[in-house]
Amino acid sequence: MPSSTPSSARPRPEPGALTVAELARAARRALPRAAWDYFRAGADGEVTLAANRRAFARWPLYPRVLVDVARCDPGLELLGARLAFPILIAPMAYQKLAHPDGELATARAAAGLGTVMVVSTLATVALEEVAAAAPGPRWFQLYVHRDRGLTRELVARARAAGYGALVLTVDAPVLGRRLADVRNGFALPPGLAMANLAGSGTEGDHFGDAARHDPSLNWRDLDWLRGIAGVPLLVKGIVRADDAARAVAAGVAGVIVSNHGGRQLDGTVAALDALPGVVAAVGGSVPVLVDGGVRWGTDVLKALALGAAAVLVGRPVLWGLAVDGEAGVARVLTLLRDELVRAMALAGCPELAAVTRDLVGG
């Protein structure tokens, strides 16, 4: 597969690029086909990929009127960190496929705007370098490997580098099949590797690394992880209320409702549709976050109204990164933040505490 396009050759976002969709179109032009397909694709027939977006249309807003919204504050406290707005950056692998600066650019944009970046185990920049790139809160996403020593080492490195939370992905015991990747023979191009796994022997082998994930991971392992984490542990990939309740009973600090962006089991419930049941099961004991299909500020508002403490955004960040590096990521976050604040004002919500369940129908 050809290496990513040099940043100097990439089209900069047009002054009229006012939406995530416009940046996505620019990113498609900028990226080699295999990289675009890897980032964009969902599993098998991509039913869940589409469902994540359709779900937002099924939840209409019921805005309040005659509310003083001269000032709208989207700020919040989350797991001990003060964030400027409830939009976090989801963990995403191989960001140097999108731009030569990769995860460094994403980290700088997140820190500059006051939000959290969740750094992937499969980053193309070592977690220590990402931490050093910019101040600000950051979390580390963890895949548990068959080699528990490697897993323990990753956790210790993240803790030593100042990561404020550990995000355990629980919906990928095996790798879902993305047909585009199979047809393209997807592989990391020369010069790119899974930097956090350097020295493992398969750090440049995407499918080899996936085969090293531990499919025996189970509920008993949460105690082990909590014991070595030293920071709050969240679980990402829950869509069932009973699983959410069990996770809380196991002592997790947060639950992330996610179907892996439609990239794992096709036909899975849309994340937004799963959110209310998970929120009810958790009962306010820990924060519930959600990812999957967020493209507009109104999407964020609907997720918050359904009980999410915050959302995580994935692919849109990659589109911004591909088009204009750090500035492109900042552009995406700024677009979504400003759309959210506008939607809060128009819905009669001067602060996040005013975004309540009665704001959405269904």
Image (cartoon, grey):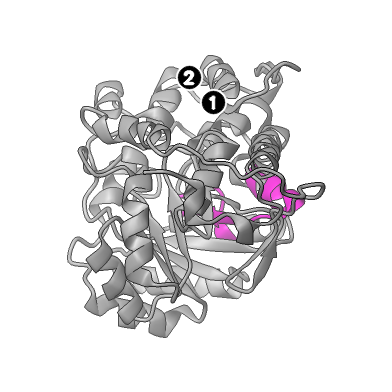
Query: 10 Å neighbourhood of mark 2: few (<14), some, or many (≥20)?
Result: some
The reply to whether the magenta stretch includes residue 106 is yes
Marks 2 and 1: in contact by CB < 8 Å? Answer: yes
Give how far across and how far down residue 220 sits, in percent. Answer: 23, 79
- Residue for point 41% across, 29% down: 40
Give how far across and how far down residue 341 sits, in percent. Answer: 69, 43
Q: Secondary structure at mark 2?
A: loop
Q: State the mark number for residue 32.
A: 2
Magenta residue span:
105-128
- Residue for point 38% across, 46% down: 272
Q: State the mark number for residue 233.
A: none
Residue highlighted by disc 1: 4
Among the 4 quarters of the image, the one containing residue 213: bottom left
The reply to whether the magenta stretch includes residue 222 is no
- Residue for point 47% across, 55% down: 357
Give how far across and how far down residue 152 sits, in percent. Answer: 40, 74
